[in-house]
Amino acid sequence: MAVTQASGVKHGFGVDVGGSGIKGGIVDLDAGQLVGDRFKVLTPHPATPQSVASGVREVVDHFGWTGPVGITLPAVIAAGVCRTAANIDPAWIGTEVYPLFAAELGDRDLAVLNDADAAGIAEDAHGAGHGRNGVTMLLTLGTGIGSAIIQNGVLLPNTELGHLEVDGKEAEHRASSKVKEDKDWSYQRWAKEVSLVLETYEKLFWPDLFIVGGGISRKADKWIPMLTNRVPVVPAELRNNAGLVGAAMAVDTGLRP
Ligand code: BGC
């Protein structure tokens, strides 16, 4: 399903829809890396399904890309339907995502999946989880908390652990990076909440490794050493591109949660 270049390198295309930007780029599927620069348009407000789909088309058209496209959304995508909208426009709930994007992008292979799930498969295959066996849990710490659970390369989609109640409060209302910002907490204060959330996940899922992504993972040395949970925590390696890369991988492998 990928587009093989004259050089033999397989290229794919990923688009990552976030609260502030819709980012896309061509992905080298063998290396799990972006080819050249990515391109971003601002997420429209309100970010209704139709306006976001137009933004995705703009990003794809910018590259003149006509092959398969993988798309992430910050929501549960199950059997082709968007089921939640914690940090996006509520109009997404109940939307059939494949007809929506096909109307903009035409007849081509598409995969639409949760943003953290996409980041998880990319990090597991090409980033911080590469070469590790067992259960890996990727968490994106941003406006919300996204989660992905992967065992030996296989994703359990839509885990939504940011909404798990931890000591009476949703995990993402305790330990997202937005909470740190809103409350103007020090890394030390925030690390206490992150530790509590990780300890809860550990007790329930017994992962072998946590990979943490999101903008705040760039400053991982400031807070990972302060964590008091048991399981090793490492920063994501593909950084901002994990979602794009994972989206392109999903459409290439036919993953359509
Ligand atoms: C959403 C998830 C998403 C995460 C990160 C949460 O609020 O429920 O679907 O993966 O934010 O964007």
Image (cartoon, rainbow, N blue to C red):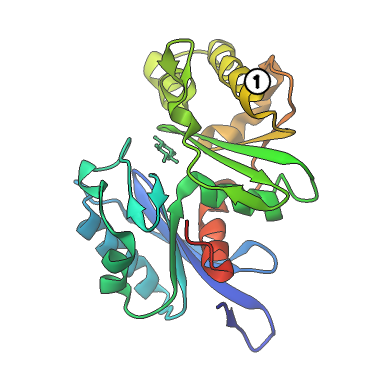
Q: Nearer the viewer, residue 180 or 231?
A: 231
Query: Which amino acid type is shown beneath numbered disc 1?
Result: Lys
Q: Identify the residue shown where x is 21% and y is 59%.
A: 50
Q: Residues within 10 Å of mark 1 (few under 14, many from 20)?
A: few
| Above or below 36: residue 206 | above
* Residue 23 is at least partly visible in this image: yes
Q: Identify the residue shown where x is 59% and y is 46%.
A: 239
**Which quadrant would residue 150 be assigned to in this image?**
top right
Residue pushed farthest front? 79
Q: Is residue 30 left or right of residue 194?
A: right
Q: Identify the residue shown where x is 51% and y is 67%.
A: 251
**Which quadrant would residue 12 be assigned to in this image?**
bottom right
Q: Is residue 123 left or right of residue 84?
A: right
| Above or below 9: residue 155 | above
Q: Is mark 1 within 8 Å of ligand 1?
A: no
Which element carries disc 1, helix, strand or loop? helix
Rendering coords of residue 24 (x, y %): 44, 62
Rendering coords of residue 82 (x, y %): 33, 50
Q: Quadrant of ligand 1?
A: top left
Rendering coords of residue 116 (x, y %): 51, 44
**Which quadrant would residue 16 be assigned to in this image?**
bottom left
Rendering coords of residue 232 (x, y %): 75, 28
* Residue 223 is at least partly visible in this image: no
Instruction: Give the labeled residue for mark 1.
Output: 203
| Above or below 75: residue 50 | below
